[in-house]
Amino acid sequence: MSDPHPVADPDASHVRVCVIGGGQAGLATGFYLRRAGLVPGVDFVILDAAEQPGGAWAQMWPSLRTFSPTRYSSLPGWMMPTWTEDSGYPLAAHVADYLSAYERRYELAVRRPVRVAGVSRADQGLLVRTDHGNWLADQVVSATGTWSRPFIPTYPGQFAGQQLHTAQYRQAADFSGRRVLVVGGGNSAAQILAEVSRVADTTWVTPRPPRFLPDDVDGHALFQLATNRRRAHDSGHPDTGGVAGLGDIVMVDSVRDARDRGVLHARDPFERLTRSGVRWTNGDHVELDVIIWCTGFRPALHHLAPLRLRGPAGLIPTHGTQAVQEPRLHLVGYGDWTGPASATLIGVGRTARDLATALTQSSAQFPIRRESRGA
């Protein structure tokens, strides 16, 4: 599909590749583009809306830990410095510092804060419109992640107490002595429940019974399983089931401690909100002061709306990372639909490597107009 009236901007700076997003996916892509011979800030540019480096990790709550040790939480080219405490599972700030140092180490010339208003088709590429000038790119990589689009499900009724999403959570002390409901069955929910339960009266609700991984299984094992599943699929073999057969929640130290304290008992989903709490179909009612929604995120793709690529499920159909209806656009880092485990530190490197290979091969046919390059 093509726009009937492609946008033109003679003042736009021209690059081979424009990467939108300066978090882990954008940095990994930049690393491989640089290794392929493209010059950061010249042949390709990385645009990031945040005011500081570190991606989403710089915005997460301080006590959050990765679910893989440092040796399995690194981007390509440079191992994350070792974190030795708590079985080696680094804090979010440690990861943010690593990402900041990573982009300096490889001189990736990330431009920030630059907010992308939209990506449109142009006569000679894709036009990336921003609040700091426009870019005409032969290829665009969207690596904006999901953190800016927290998802909260809709329930009937209305709750008069405090509600917040994982993205707004900062510390357990904010809920001391209060009645708190944690909603969600993933790693974030388990870690938040583990620490809030030390200072508050907590209830845990999950969409299905929580599934805990064996104590010796971490994110590295999950990545290998996801990779093996994709390989089986690509070669026409039966679906291996990936990580689904193991579980959802990695047993980091805080979650194991919560298990030992008898905290990790979840209830089925409730039916509705009330002004003072939540109610189940059997009539049970729990009085609450706070609901913490650990219910995930959606891909941040609003900047791609002018391309009109979304499918019925709300996602952009892709073949690997390449948008089916716009081959000059690639998406990386949003989850398995854009590469096996590509939303993880350990997983995004392989996808970024393959993506950079495809980009450099295809963009080689587009000569750079050196005189039109600008800030």
Image (cartoon, rainbow, N blue to C red):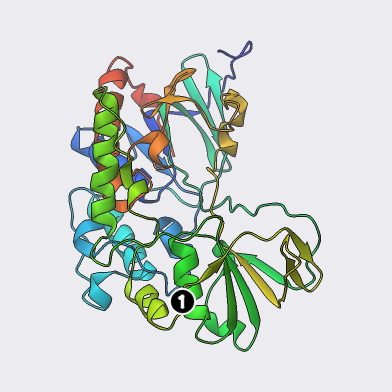
Residue 356 in sight from this viewpoint:
no
- Where 278 sits versus 359, above or below? below
Q: Is residue 5 visible?
A: yes
Around disc 1, counting alpha carbons within 10 Å, would you say few (fewer than 14), some (14 to 19), or many (20 or more)? many
Say which element carries label 1: helix
Q: Nearer the viewer, residue 12 or 96?
A: 96
Q: Residue at x 46, y 76 (%)?
A: 194
- Residue at 47% x, 64% y: name it: 188
**152 displayed left or right of 156:** left
Q: Amino acid at mark 1?
A: Ala
Image location of residue 345, percent across then percent down:
31, 52
In the shown orientation, is residue 240 left or right of residue 190?
left
Q: Residue furthest front?
A: 282
Query: What residue lies at 71% left-to-right and 52% top-to-bottom?
Result: 154
- Tally the numbered discs: 1
Q: Residue 353, located in which quarter of the rendered image?
A: top left
Q: Is residue 262 above or below residue 72?
A: below
Q: Position of residue 268 (x, y in %)?
A: 60, 61
Q: Quadrant of the C terminus?
A: top left
Quadrant containing the N terminus is top right
Residue 338 drawn above or below residue 176: above
In the depicted view, which residue is nearer to us: 248 or 254?
248
Q: Which residue is mark 1?
A: 194
Residue 275 x/y as whole percent: 82, 70
In-front residue for pair 4/113: 4
